[in-house]
């Protein structure tokens, strides 16, 4: 089975996996955006394929132990969340859990589709608890698609400007969350605090260089700054 229905059945299994107790049919149908009748049919299909879903209409449904799904079922957001968390552990606990985090990252890399890599997750945390910002989703999408962004930014002096940037990586630090990017106006790498970005939207064109090249150049620049070269 393939197509929208197969994807919906997998979504249904994932929802059930998150719950230890029976979930009402109305709740499941609402999360999936389908009717109760469609939900009942989908449950019957899963049961017919041997998926251990127990329950009935009016009683709720629960997924019993015995089902194993491959990690390839991770979606984009789940991969980003896993990699961000493992990178944080590797940096903060290098002697204890660092090797375990590195091993887990390697295993995730091994099972990802050929067009996906943990290196494409351009998020990292260094001693901070990451915060959500309204622009973060737009930035992540632009990084994945290698698209330029138009941003409205206010610097520490309170001076506002509009920039077109090529987003490279987002870092979560104790003091602030920061976007590293190539700024078309300055013709150089610049760092922008996410809490000072009033608006971020697609600029309508691609980055002037491939993202992997920008990332490598930015890292070289950072290394040169750190060693005082």
Image: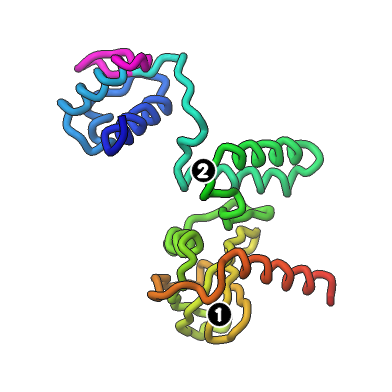
The answer to whether residue 80 is visible is no
Helix or strand or loop: what does disc 1 sit on?
strand
**95 over 115 or under it: above or below:** above
Tell me the quarter of the image containing the N terminus: top left
> Is residue 54 found inside the magenta-colored segment of the image?
yes
Please give left or right for residue 41 compared with residue 205 in the image. Answer: left
Residue in view at x 56 percent, y 68 percent: 210
Residue in view at x 51 percent, y 43 percent: 113
Nearest the eye: 154 or 149:
149
Q: Earlier in the sequence, mark 2 or mark 1?
A: 2
Residue in view at x 31 percent, y 23 percent: 23
Tell me the quarter of the image containing the C terminus: bottom right
**91 over 211 or under it: above or below:** above
Nearest the eye: 110 or 152:
110
> Is residue 103 found inside the magenta-colored segment of the image?
no
Mark 2 and mark 1 residues within 8 Å of each other at the beta carbon: no
Nearest the eye: 93 or 9:
9
Start-end of magenta stretch: 47-61
Marks 2 and 1, Cα distance to the nearest angstrom?
A: 32 Å
Percent across and percent down for residue 81 are 53, 45
Q: Residue 17 sits in which quadrant?
A: top left
Residue in view at x 64 percent, y 54 percent: 125
Percent across and percent down for residue 187 are 59, 85
Q: Circle 2 sits on which residue?
A: 113
Q: Circle 1 sits on which residue?
A: 183
């Amino acid at each position: 089975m393939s197509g929208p229905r197969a994807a919906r059945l997998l979504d249904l299994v994932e929802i059930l996996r998150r719950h230890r107790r029976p979930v009402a049919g109305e709740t499941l149908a609402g999360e999936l955006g389908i009717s109760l009748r469609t939900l009942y049919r989908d449950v019957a299909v899963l049961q017919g394929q041997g998926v251990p879903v127990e329950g009935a209409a009016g009683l709720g449904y629960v997924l019993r132990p015995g089902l194993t799904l491959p990690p390839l079922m991770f979606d984009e957001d789940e991969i980003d969340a896993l990699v961000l968390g493992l990178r944080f552990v590797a940096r903060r606990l290098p002697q204890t859990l660092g090797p375990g985090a590195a091993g887990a990252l390697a295993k995730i890399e091994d099972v990802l589709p050929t067009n996906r890599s943990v290196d494409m997750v351009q998020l990292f945390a260094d001693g901070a608890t990451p915060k959500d910002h309204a622009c973060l989703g737009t930035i992540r999408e632009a990084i994945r698609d290698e698209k330029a962004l138009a941003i409205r930014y206010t610097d520490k002096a309170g001076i506002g400007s509009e920039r077109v940037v090529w987003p490279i990586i987002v870092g979560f630090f104790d003091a602030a969350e920061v976007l590293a990017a190539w700024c078309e106006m300055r013709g150089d790498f610049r760092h922008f605090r996410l809490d000072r970005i009033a608006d971020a939207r697609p600029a309508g064109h691609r980055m002037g260089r491939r993202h992997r090249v920008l990332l490598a150049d930015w890292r070289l620049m950072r290394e040169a700054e750190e060693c005082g070269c």
